[in-house]
Amino acid sequence: MTWIRSRSNYACVVLFVWAFAPGLRRIVDWRTSFSSISLISVLPLVALAPAAYLLLLGNGSGRYLDRRLIYAAWLWLGGFLYAYAVGLAAGNYVSATYAFVGFTIPLAFALWLAASDEPASLVYRRIAATMLGLATALAAYAFYQFAAPPPWDLAWMQRTKLVSIGIPAPFLFRPFSTLNAPGPFADFLIVAILLNLPRLRGANALRFAQLALCLGALGITLVRADWLALLVGTAAYVVLSPGKARNLTVVAVLAIVAGLFIANAPALLGSSRAGLDLQRRLDTLSDLQSDTSYRERQRYFGDALTTAVDQPTGEGLGVIGTAAKLGNAGSTVDFDNGFIARFTEMGYFGTACYLATLVTTLTLAFRRWRALSQAGLRDDAGVAAACVAIQLAFFLLDVSSDHHEQLGGLFYWLSLALIYGRGGAPALETVASSRRSAAFSS
């Protein structure tokens, strides 16, 4: 497949497909007829397939990948191959296969991108700029959707019975933009924000305004888990990034903008009800026991965890999430805790592999940041700090739901590919060589 000449450009196309395919499906369903299963829904996964094929074929130059990244990939695959086998043994052939692909094909895509010989700085700039551009478009549409929801979005909410996100009427629901729920939309926004923090060093009013718009859109999603994940991720970035004083100032200004938005939400959103909902959501952060959704999630540490503990082998892939629609359940099975969801499906062995991978990749990201910092590569170290922030944010987000499959999995592995890419190795090797030469000459 020689038509994929620039891997970073193709990665930007992939991100575009993931951002807009759900919205396209809603329009098609509105114009034709609604179906709980649509071929358009698998377009994003299909977009990843050529890269996975090339990697498996050997044309993806997988031999150039960092050894530590390969170890993490095998650890991940080991856990999910086991859970896939259990799912097949339980008779969930289609649903287990769909779930397995959702967890593993983003990994294959990221490895293919990491094997590219394009300069790491170029790959980062293209992907970060694309993410910010897409997030800006999604945020702008979310505000429009919130105030005057288009008929295809209203029809989608009515047909899917998405009662958890509100009433299908202006200002009475949590916007999801062109994605299929407020959660994935919020995930998209926080990745775009964190990934672009290193690009705020220059005085760029447009870029700053784009991030402010994304922050505002994140606010009206009312997804508290992503609010907290962004807060933790931003704090990690400020602590790790070079130029801490300047970055702290930039973050403080963004925080002030967010505060002004919250304080003036009723006037800015054009609805006193919307402003009140936002304020109530914020208030629950200081009094979680009064929040219904928090209490509902607490039960996962009771009955659901006990059930998972009693099944050491796990139930196998395909019994939780969207994949369950293709299995015996016949409908989506929501699970508001990603760690317990993995324990339920993957059992003791699979979950051990899963958790070990999360810890390994977070450690790898941190070590790459430290190596770049010690080498004096400030710009690259800033990018690595942002990737550490994304890794940490997604680790924490698993407390609310699965965040390492499909779109979340793409973001998770992409953050590693950006700093462990083949194109970034020469810079570190050059610095190391210079130091060895200096030590030898002295």
Image (cartoon, helix red, strand yellow):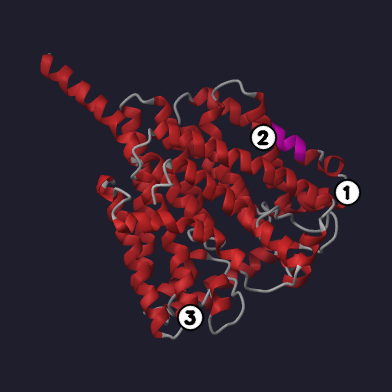
Picture quarter containing residue 296? bottom right
The alpha-carbon separation of the residues under discs 3 and 1 comes to 44 Å
Which of disc 2 and disc 1 is earlier in sequence?
A: 2
Magenta highlight range: 255-261
For this orientation, the residue located farthest to the front is 2
For this orientation, the residue located farthest to the top is 442
Residue at x 54%, y 39% (from the top left corner): 194
Q: Residues within 10 Å of mark 1 (few under 14, many from 20)?
A: some
Residue at x 45%, y 63% (from the top left corner): 103
The alpha-carbon separation of the residues under discs 3 and 2 comes to 45 Å
Could you say where residue 171 lies in the image, as x and y percent from the top left? 83, 54
The amino acid type of the residue labelled 3 equals: Thr
Whether residues under marks 3 and 2 lie with C-beta atoms below 8 angstroms apart, the answer is no
Secondary structure, mark 3, is helix
| Nearest-to-viewer mark from 3 and 2 | 2
Which of disc 2 and disc 3 is earlier in sequence?
A: 2
Whether residues under marks 1 and 2 lie with C-beta atoms below 8 angstroms apart, the answer is no
| Nearest-to-viewer mark from 1 and 2 | 2
Whether residues under marks 3 and 1 lie with C-beta atoms below 8 angstroms apart, the answer is no
**Which of the labelled discs sits on residue 272, or is there none?**
1
| Nearest-to-viewer mark from 3 and 1 | 1
- Looking at the rendered image, the quarter that the C terminus falls into is top left
Q: Is residue 271 above or below residue 31?
A: above
Q: Which residue is mark 3?
A: 307
Q: Name the magenta segment's main secondary structure.
A: helix
**Which of the labelled discs sits on residue 1, or is there none?**
none
The amino acid type of the residue labelled 1 equals: Ser
Left or right placement of residue 12 versus residue 181 in this view: left
Q: Which residue is mark 2?
A: 210
Could you say where residue 252 lies in the image, as x and y percent from the top left? 62, 30
The alpha-carbon separation of the residues under discs 1 and 2 comes to 25 Å
